[in-house]
Image (cartoon, rainbow, N blue to C red):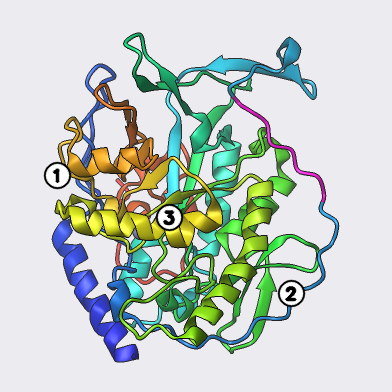
């Protein structure tokens, strides 16, 4: 099994290096938004769903009895507070650029991630460590960014022609602050992550809060809020409530092929599906429901990353439709409706020409998606004219950009202050 994973990882990395990195410079011109960059290479989770058997996992602690929740307020940033003030803070209209950063799950134990195995390079390229994540949050906060939910930035309305269209909302922010969307891709807790120093799953802690469960390098159980980007952001917002004036956290971009949030809620068409497997799946579905509920209550939202992390540029409509239905059946049925789609591998449907609207895009839009997110060299966005949809790019704090795109991220943080010395010595270009 391990050899199989290692082989797949090696293939993934080979492919990744063939695709090139994020090194291109972009002149910004408001009148002519730059063409979004080539899709960024995928994280090291590209094993085909069918190739990975579910692995037995250590049993988590029994869930504690529910405790009474602290109230959590979620506010609408598109509404000016009465009198232009809230809690003594003056609010102002904002129509400028909304920055968007995305993360993969973060590395809790760098010694397990950077151990020289076949996954090391992929983890270095596409992930940040807990220490880096903390420093990035601190720095974004110090640079006057405040969190907004992606679903609040654009709305659907009716155009003069009677057709539905998307519009950009004016945001009302604390004066002097800048909006920041966060999204986290692949928050599924894939088996390869568990072996490489990431947390295993989310649970509800004794205090009723979302917490991570995992194993330290010695195999001891660890229940913590500080080792996983989800509870860690919750904690950061508790420490700095003004970082999230509307209560927004991040949008979680979920596949389905290995379940969600550490729970094995998926079907598997490659094995004979028995009553026992289905019973186990149903119990995992029940177990994840309180986590989803608590995440939603505390400002987290959900988007699709496709069920199988598939390539939407393939033009294979049979595969795209079957995958989309499966996402709704197995993931949407748990997390609820969403208008947000995050392209796996950053790959746009129907080829790279974002000005065109092809068959796959039209199909996905017909299924309710309105905001289509790729990956690029800036927080580019474009409201499509021929269909009710927005396309946007996200920046990606990770090893590739910490090493090679320092300047582009200076408005958020300086890679020199962020980069974890625990990373392998692959070099940097900080000029
Ligand atoms: Zn992904």
Q: Residue at x 62, y 52 (%)?
A: 233
Select label 2 or label 3 by which is in front.
3
Q: Are marks 1 and 2 in contact (CB under 8 Å)?
A: no
Left or right: 240, with 157 as reference point:
right
Q: Quadrant of the N terminus?
A: bottom left
What residue sits right under mark 1 in the picture? 351
What residue sits right under mark 2 in the picture? 63
Whichever of callouts 1 and 3 sits on the residue coming sooner in the sequence is 3
Which portion, as a residue range, is magenta? 70-77
Whichever of callouts 1 and 2 sits on the residue coming sooner in the sequence is 2
Q: Residue at x 58, y 55 (%)?
A: 134
What residue sits right under mark 3 in the picture? 328
Left or right: 85, with 258 as reference point:
right
Select label 1 or label 3 by which is in front.
3
Question: Of residues 65 and 26, which is closer to you in this image?
Answer: 65
> How far separated are the C-alphas under marks 1 and 3?
24 Å
Question: Of residues 308 and 42, which is closer to you in this image?
Answer: 308
Left or right: 336, with 361 as reference point:
right
Q: Residue at x 55, y 85 (%)?
A: 217
SS type, badge 3: helix
298 shown above or below 200: above
């Amino acid at each position: 099994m391990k050899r199989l994973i290692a082989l797949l990882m090696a293939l993934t990395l080979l492919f990744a290096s063939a695709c090139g990195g994020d090194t291109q410079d972009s002149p910004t011109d408001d009148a002519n938004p730059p063409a979004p960059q080539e899709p960024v290479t995928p994280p090291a989770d590209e094993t085909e769903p069918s190739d990975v058997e579910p692995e037995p996992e250590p049993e988590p602690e029994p869930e504690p009895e529910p405790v009474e929740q602290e109230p959590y307020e979620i506010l609408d940033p598109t509404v000016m507070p009465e009198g232009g003030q809230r809690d003594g803070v003056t609010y102002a209209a904002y129509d400028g650029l909304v920055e968007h950063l995305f993360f993969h799950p973060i590395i809790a134990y760098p010694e397990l991630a950077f151990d020289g195995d076949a996954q090391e390079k992929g983890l270095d390229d596409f992930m940040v460590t807990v220490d880096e994540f903390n420093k990035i949050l601190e720095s974004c906060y110090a640079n006057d960014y405040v969190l907004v939910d992606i679903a609040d930035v654009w709305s659907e309305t009716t155009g003069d022609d009677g057709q539905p269209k998307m519009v950009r909302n004016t945001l009302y922010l604390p004066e002097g602050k800048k909006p920041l969307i966060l999204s986290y891709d692949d928050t599924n807790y894939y088996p390869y992550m568990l072996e490489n120093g990431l947390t295993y799953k989310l649970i509800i802690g004794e205090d009723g809060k979302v917490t991570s469960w995992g194993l330290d390098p010695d195999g001891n159980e660890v229940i913590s809020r500080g080792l996983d980007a989800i509870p860690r952001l919750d904690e950061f917002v508790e420490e700095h409530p003004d970082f999230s004036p509307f209560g927004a956290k991040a949008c979680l971009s979920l596949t389905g092929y290995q379940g969600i949030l550490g729970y094995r809620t998926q079907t598997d068409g490659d094995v004979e599906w028995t009553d026992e497997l289905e019973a186990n799946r149903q119990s995992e579905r029940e177990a994840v429901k309180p986590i989803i509920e608590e995440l939603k209550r505390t400002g987290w939202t959900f988007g699709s990353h496709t069920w199988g992390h598939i390539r939407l540029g393939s033009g294979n409509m049979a595969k795209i439709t079957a995958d989309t239905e499966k996402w709704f059946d197995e993931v949407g049925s748990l997390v609820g409706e969403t208008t947000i789609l995050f392209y796996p591998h950053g790959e746009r449907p129907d080829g790279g020409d974002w000005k065109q609207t092809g068959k796959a895009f039209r199909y996905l839009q017909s299924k309710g998606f309105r905001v289509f997110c790729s990956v690029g060299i800036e927080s580019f966005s474009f409201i499509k004219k021929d269909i009710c949809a927005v396309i946007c790019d996200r920046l990606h704090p990770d090893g590739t950009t910490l090493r090679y795109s320092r300047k582009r991220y200076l408005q958020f943080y300086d890679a020199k202050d962020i980069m974890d010395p625990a990373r392998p010595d692959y070099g940097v270009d900080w000029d």
